[in-house]
Amino acid sequence: MENIEINQNLSTPYFPSVKFEVSSGVCEISGESYMEEAYKFYLPLINWIRQFTEEEKRKITLNIKLIYFNTSTSKCLLDIFEILKKYKEQGGQTEVNWFYDEDDPDMVEEVRDFENEAEMEFNIKAF
């Protein structure tokens, strides 16, 4: 397995930055995510998380620091949460930290909706 690192490009601000590290099991998605075909962008990330949970069998931490995302991104995030939920049900260690902008308190409510949909508990933290 290899790390994934995608730096945010100011000429395409609707793509988030991504950093997934095999050695630490820490995965981070940050910035904005509102591209047209989100699934094409997120599919390698979804596959990476699936492979990590199947092969590495260590703790995985997902840090989400999205300040804006669209409906297509929401669906992709739910796919990721489904993999993490199954991994946890099989005895794996997972942690989801969702960071939100203190100036956007509505985001907390949206994150709570994700928790309910995913049937997982998140650590919700202001940044």
Image (cartoon, grey):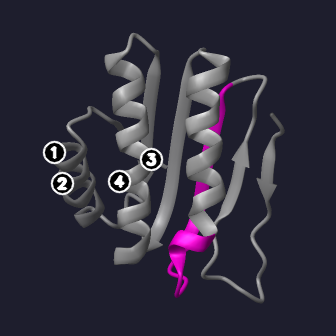
Residue at coordinates 55% horizontally, 50% vertically from top-left?
Answer: 46
Which mark sits nearer the N-terminus, 2 or 4?
4
Q: Quadrant of residue 22?
A: top right
Label 2 secondary element: helix
Please give the residue where the numbered disc 3 appears in the rendered image. 80
Between disc 2 and disc 4, the foreground one is 4
Observer able to see residue 125: no
- Residue 105 seen: yes
Residue at x 61%, y 47% (from the top left corner): 47
Residue pointed to by mark 4: 78
Q: Quadrant of residue 50?
A: top right
**Three-letter code, disc 1:** Asn
Spatial separation of the CA atoms under disc 3 and disc 2: 15 Å
Q: Amino acid at mark 4?
A: Leu
The residue segment tinted magenta is 25-40
Q: Give the numbered dot on residue 113.
A: 2
Per the model, the C-alpha gap separating discs 2 and 4 is 11 Å
Q: Residues within 10 Å of mark 3 (few under 14, many from 20)?
A: many
> Which residue type does callout 3 highlight?
Ile
Q: Which residue is mark 1?
A: 116
x, y percent for residue 32: 55, 72
Q: Is residue 89 magenta?
A: no
Instruction: State the residue in front, 28 or 101.
Output: 28
Q: Quadrant of the N terminus?
A: top right
Callouts 2 and 1 close, C-beta under 8 Å: yes
